[in-house]
């Protein structure tokens, strides 16, 4: 009985280890969940713009509004500071399942800033 348990445990360990290692060896990546990625990006952006050591927490310090999607992976993401009610937005470009901050945070943008965006996004933002 004890030999069977040890054999089963060893086989299970080898299968789990093989599965984990094969993902790293073959270059497979784990699935990124976009909402968490956007939450983290906004949190870090707020932290950097406020020059603070505090990392804002989604659901406590800020909330995310309706995300507007455009063609070719462009996103406009509004967010709101929960304590003050102030709103802001960022413009992201999603390339290969990774969101890149292109513009923001802000409430209005200059025409030179809007000129770097696709026309559909720029028009949405008020160009």
Image (cartoon, rainbow, N blue to C red):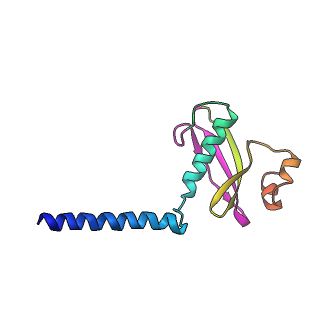
Query: Looking at the picture, how far across and down is residue 109, in whole percent?
Result: 81, 44
Give 8 or 90, whichever is nearer the viewer.
8
**x and y, in percent, of residue 68 in the image:** 67, 57
- 102 shown above or below 49: below
> Residue at left 64%, top 55%?
67
* Magenta region: 57-83
45 shown above or below 101? above
Does any portion of residue 86 appear in the rendered image?
no
Q: Is residue 45 left or right of residue 15?
A: right
Q: Residue furthest top?
A: 52
Q: Quadrant of residue 2?
A: bottom left
Q: Position of residue 127 (x, y in %)?
A: 85, 52
Q: Which residue shows up at 67% across the image and 31% down it?
A: 51
Judge by depth and name the residue closer to the eye, 83 or 102.
102
Q: Residue 43, located in which quarter of the rendered image?
A: top right
The residue under the point 54% across, 43% down is 58
Whether the magenta-drawn stretch holds residue 88 is answered as no
- Pick the front one: 83 or 95: 95
Question: Where 48 falls versus 11 (above or below)?
Answer: above
User: In the picture, which quadrant includes the N terminus?
Assistant: bottom left
Q: Nearer the viewer, residue 127 or 18?
A: 18
| Residue 117 showing in the rendered view | yes
Classify 96 as above or below 42.
below
Question: How many numbered discs, if any?
Answer: 0
Estimate the x, y position of residue 116 in percent, counting from the top left: 84, 54
In the rendered structure, the answer to whether residue 16 lies left or right of residue 10 reads right
58 inside magenta stretch: yes
* 23 displayed left or right of 101: left
Which residue appears farthest toward the right when viewing the image?
112
């Amino acid at each position: 009985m004890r030999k069977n348990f040890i054999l089963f445990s060893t086989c299970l360990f080898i299968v789990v280890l093989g599965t984990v290692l094969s993902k790293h060896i073959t270059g497979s990546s784990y699935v990124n969940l976009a909402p968490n990625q956007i939450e983290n990006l906004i949190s870090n952006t707020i932290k950097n713009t406020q020059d603070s050591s505090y990392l804002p927490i989604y659901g406590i310090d800020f909330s995310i509004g309706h995300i507007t999607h455009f063609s070719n992976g462009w996103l406009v993401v509004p967010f709101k500071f929960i304590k003050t009610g102030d709103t802001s937005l960022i413009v992201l470009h999603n390339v290969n399942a990774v969101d890149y901050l292109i513009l923001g945070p802000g409430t209005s943008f200059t025409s030179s800033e809007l000129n770097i965006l696709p026309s559909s996004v720029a028009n949405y933002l008020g160009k």
